[in-house]
Every structure is written in C-alpha cells, then in structure tokens.
Amino acid sequence: MTDELKNYRIDKPMDYLHKRLFLYNGPLMHEFFKFPGKYVGPCPNSNLNGDGSISEVDISYLVIDGENQKLIINVEDETSNVNEETLKKSNKYKINHQYAYKYPVYSVITTSLPSHRCLKELKTSPTDIFRPKIISYLDFNGEKILNRLKTKIKNNNFLTKLQLLSLILVIRTFPKNNSEILEEICSLIKIAKSKDKEFKMEMVYCSRYIIHKYAKTVEDILRLEEVVGLNKAVTCGSIIENIKN
C-alpha cells in the first residue's frame, strides 16, 4: 500500500459530516431533531472572546418561535467527551452569541456517547446553572429506523429528503457492529430512489464521511466509495458548483 493510500482516511470525518449537513441542509436537520421554532438561516460561526481571541462554533442558526421572537440555536457535536470542559465551551459560545446578537440561545450538544456518560448541567455562578440540550444518537431506535428505510427501498418507493438524511445518520444510532451495518447502508444508498436527484447526489457525497469513520480498512473505504457511486456524486457536485458560480 502506498503512503498516499495509508493517509487516505479522513481525519475526524464526523466533524465534516455534522457541519456539511447543517450548512447545506439546515431546515432538514432542524426538522430531524425537532428543534423549536421555524428555521430562518445560518449565523456567523466566529465570535470574539473576552480576551480578544476568536472562537468558532460548529453550527449556529436563527429561528423564529411561535411568538415571532428570534432565537439562536447552537449545535455542537461531540464524539469523545461530554464533560465539564465540553459544557464550559458550549456555555462560552452561548454568552458570545448573546452578546453579539442580543438574542436568547438554545444550546445543543449531539453525541455518539450514551446519555449516562454525559454531564447534563454545569454551575456557572452561585445562582446560574447551564443546562444544554443533550442528544445522544444512541437514544434513537436505530434498528427500527433502518428496517423502515429498508422496507421502503426494497419496495421501490421514493424516499423523502428526511428519509434519505436518516439513511446517512442512522449508523450513529448503533453502539456496535458499525462496520457491518455500514455495508448494508451503503448497499441501500446505492439503490435508494429520490425525486430530487441533486439531493440524492448530496447524500451520496455525505456517505463518504460515514465510510471513512466506520470502514475497517482503506481497502474497504475504496470499495464502499465505489458501491455508493461517490465518483459520480463528486462529478455531479462539481458541475452544480460551476453552474452556481
């Protein structure tokens, strides 16, 4: 194996997946997680800290609630720890956003860790407690979601955008045997039908991140990228980008 192939696996692919899904498909991700309010649009992800440094959040966007009030939703994805440091960081982002935009902030932490391993709250002052919304993918019923998608695909039904999105994210809902589940998901992605071909190509492109995360070897990565048709998705994406430009 050449050095180029040895280094082929993407570093921190879930970071890229999280950001890409929210940046390109914000309203759909908002619907997937059933967050409050109506999606309006993204917010700048860089803010000044009190010491003059700049911090960058994963995702922040604006919504309007039922009383026509604006609210910022900040979503951080954590794959290793949800501890005191994690909550301190999320609380700092909340304070920065409130200062910069003068809107309340709904703080969310999504994670692949089980809920019982996540710190739920942090006392930030004698009178204040920071309690972000903690969402563990493991709390979703992954087997039920996957079986429903499998049935639709095998019955030759068109998938909605939300269902296609779920097909990419469902692997994070399983605590083990992810490489085996990945094989099945990639086969399903290949044959899944959508009325929106551009969106289907976008989801095929996003599948590369779960492939790089969960495939056992570089050879498996290359094989599964071929299975889902990644080369076609990249070519299609390049054409679309050129048209937009």
Image (spheres, rainbow, N blue to C red):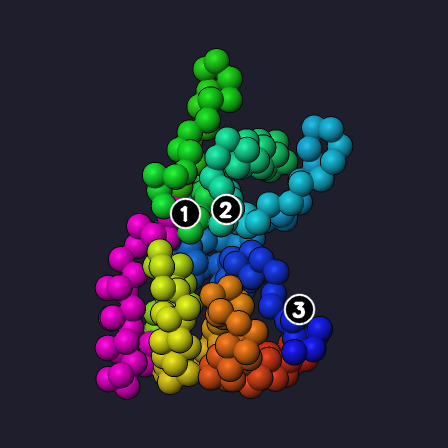
Amino acid at circle 3: Asn
Amino acid at circle 1: Leu
- Mark 2 and mark 3 lie on one chain; the one further toward the N terminus is 3
At x 36%, y 76%, the residue is: 184
> Which of labels 2 and 3 is toward the front?
3
Q: Do the numbered discs 1 and 2 sit on residues whose CB atoms are within 8 Å? A: yes
Q: CA distance from mark 1 to mark 3?
A: 27 Å
Residue 1: image tag? none
The quarter of the picture where the N terminus appears is: bottom right
Magenta range: 135-159
Residue 7: image tag? 3
Amino acid at circle 2: Ser
> Which of labels 1 and 3 is toward the front?
3
Q: Which residue is mark 1?
A: 113
Where does residue 145 sit, x and y in percent of width and height?
Answer: 28, 65
- Horizontal side of 157 relative to 83 (left or right) equals left
Where does residue 49 sit, x and y in percent of width and height?
Answer: 69, 33
- Horizontal side of 236 relative to 68 (left or right) equals right
Q: Residues within 10 Å of mark 3 (few under 14, many from 20)?
A: few
